[in-house]
Amino acid sequence: MSNKLIKYLSSLRFTILLICLLGLMFIIGLWVPQVRLVKDIYLEWYRNSPRLVELLDAFGLTTIYTSPITITLWVLFFINLGLVLWQRMPLVKQRIAISEAKIADPENAAGYPYRNSFTLPADFDGETVVAKLRKRRYTLLGNASGFYAAKNRLAPIAFVLFHVSFYLVLLGGLISVYTEFIAYLDLAQGETFHGELSRYNSSPSPKLPAFGSPPSASFTVASVVPRVVNYTPTSISVKLLDGQGQTHEVGINTPYSTGPTSFVFKHLGMAPHFVLKDFAGTVIENTLVKLDVLKMRPDTFALAGYTFTATFYPDYVLENGKRATRSMEFNNPVFFIAVERDGKKVAEGLVPKNGTLEFDGKRLEMQELRYWVRFYVITQRGLSILYLGFAVACIAVVWRMIFYKREIVGAVRESEGERLLVVAGRSEYYKDLAEDEFNKLFCKITGKSGEV
Amino acid sequence: MAFWEIVFYWVALVIYSAACGGYLYSFIFKNPRVMPKMTALVGAGFVSVSIAIIARFNATGHLPWSGHYEYVLMGGWFIIAGTLFVGWQNKSLQGLAVATLPLVIIMMGYGYMQKPGLTPMAASLKTIWLYIHVYFAWLSFGAYSLAMAAGVLFLLKHKSEAREVPNPAYDRFPTLGRLDELIFRYVIFGFVTDTIMICAGAIWAKALWGSYWAWDPVETWSLISWLIYGITIHLRVTFRWRETRLAWLAVGALSSVIISFFGVNLVVDTSLHVFQVR
């Protein structure tokens, strides 16, 4: 019974079944909104069809990539991979082994579908053929009277490497998952961060690592310079000044990395410095506000009991009497601010940099306009193992699939006063195409056209 | 679109359509003599697309790597480059164009309906990983398309040979055995480049999004298509799936690649593979 089970668990049929099931789970994951990936869509779906979503929740289909079903499939997949590897090891050893016993009569050798003979030129001795095969990277045993030659003899090792690479990716992935710290951090130009956990955004809440501690980075955002051409953001340069006085430049594709922690630029916003005064000039409130307004959606903030709704125009223009922006370039940044108190509109107006808005006996001054950036802070250990897995997988798949094994048995024989090279050959994966390849090879070696 | 880009894009589309008609005529009316002329025509169309790409490069300052229109421009270029390359290496494979040309024509038509405006390179795309990732993606798409084309040829030739009087138009193509092995060879090449593409994409994703794998819809689909081709290779090598079954697999599996390139972003708007191009 257990033998039967192990046999099934180690079968390729089972591998294919598992891959199909995993593929099916991934497809379901694309169709069913996932809580972690598209929370807003998930919540909207939940509001519309709570029973259906609860049912899907119960089966873990809304967290499908970490659901018990998927984890079970992965566990079975790696068990299957391990068993396949274990069972195929002797076969791999056998395939790469080379011995005199492999020298066979090319006219009768079993398992060699390609057979041909080539007349050798008069000045050509058998050893020249052997030397020419060696020159073409064939490992050769024997001599002209009978030889066995193999090209890419060690290719079956790549099978082992390819499957081992999956374990490296798994190991790297597991280490990264269990040491993972994820959080978002909003910092405006001039703000300093010392690694305080309380400074990270509360929504979504930071994911603390199962092993290890949160990162202990410390830096000040020295400058933020975005570049936009029309509507396309073409670059961003965020300069960070660390505790040692060193400057680090963060851009898109170039996070600030300190140890296993990366601060990845995620989002840009406007951070106006507002001062609310009364008409006598006394400061009522003074604050740097981080507004998420660059997607042309208004954002709100509150000062002294008033609610301010701000819409931002990076390149402000009045078109047909309507407020608009010529582009997303920061050529003429202007806020349109509506002020409310207790749900009633008090005032509204345009506020450019250093501009003011007067209302209700008060004056709102924008003294400075900075940027703020949102960093995606992620700590992951084990990435070097994971990348090693990727590298091994790439090398192994190229080795196994492109540098596959070819074997030849041959002999130089005399027949009717002529010297003939008699050969038989076989190749992994191919028969007809290998025939073309062998014909081409021996025609080049002998300088003759092939004769069957 | 730049002026010369529009001109040569349309010239290429017209040439490809004419060549496609010629290939179909050759098959349907059993006239194989037309085929080399059609290959020359495809070559002319390829030159025309290349000029369109150069014109776009000249106008934007970067190679067309982003957005659906640019995907089809470069994707079509790679597929036809592959078709011409294998046809040049082996004359009997010139007929692969009968399957790859319609695919490229549909892609080009679809691309034109997207946003072909001239846009500067988005910041997220300014990295060496773009070239590695996208280059291998196109190589794999090209190879899988050739596998599909070889599959189509195999099925047509197989059907023709089952008749009492086979269509002489198929005589120019390799034997069924060779076509069967060619399908596998193209699948192998596609799988190798696909593997490199996914690994390079994961490393780029770590720098760009902070995570090497985020179950993004495009990521997930490319994993699904990689698994499908992985299964195809296993079925061929271990279960000896050959000939008709392999040909159908090569034709069917291409749909998973088309979905990951074009389909996912049509259906799902949550993919990170959008790159803010307007």
Image (cartoon, rainbow, N blue to C red):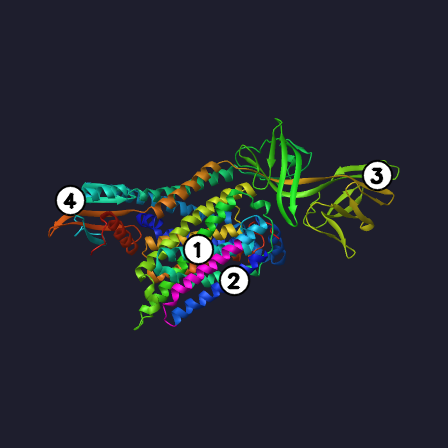
User: Which residue in the protein does label 1 denote?
Assistant: B81
Task: Name the image quarter holding the N terminus of chain B.
Answer: bottom right
Report the side of B23 relative to A205 (left or right): left
Asked if the residues shown at circle 2 and circle 3 are in contact, with their CB atoms under 8 angstroms apart, the answer is: no
Q: Depth-wise, is mark 2 or mark 3 nearer the camera?
A: 2
B32 in the magenta segment: yes
First along the sequence among labels 3 and 4: 4
Query: Do tags 2 and 3 sit on the same chain?
Result: no
First along the sequence among labels 1 and 2: 2
Q: Depth-wise, is mark 1 or mark 3 nearer the camera?
A: 1
- In terms of image quadrants, where is residue B171? bottom left
Residue A277's label in the rendered image is 3
Q: Report x, y in % for residue A127.
A: 19, 42
Which residue extends farthest top?
A: A244
Q: Main secondary structure of the magenta part?
A: helix
Asked if the residues shown at circle 2 and circle 4 are in contact, with their CB atoms under 8 angstroms apart, the answer is: no
Which residue extends farthest left?
A: A416
User: Would you call the spot at circle 3 few (<14 residues within 10 Å), some (14-19), or many (20 or more)?
Assistant: some
Q: Which residues are magenta?
A: B29-53
Q: Report x, y in % for residue A406.
A: 27, 47
Tell me the amino acid under the disc marked 1.
Ala
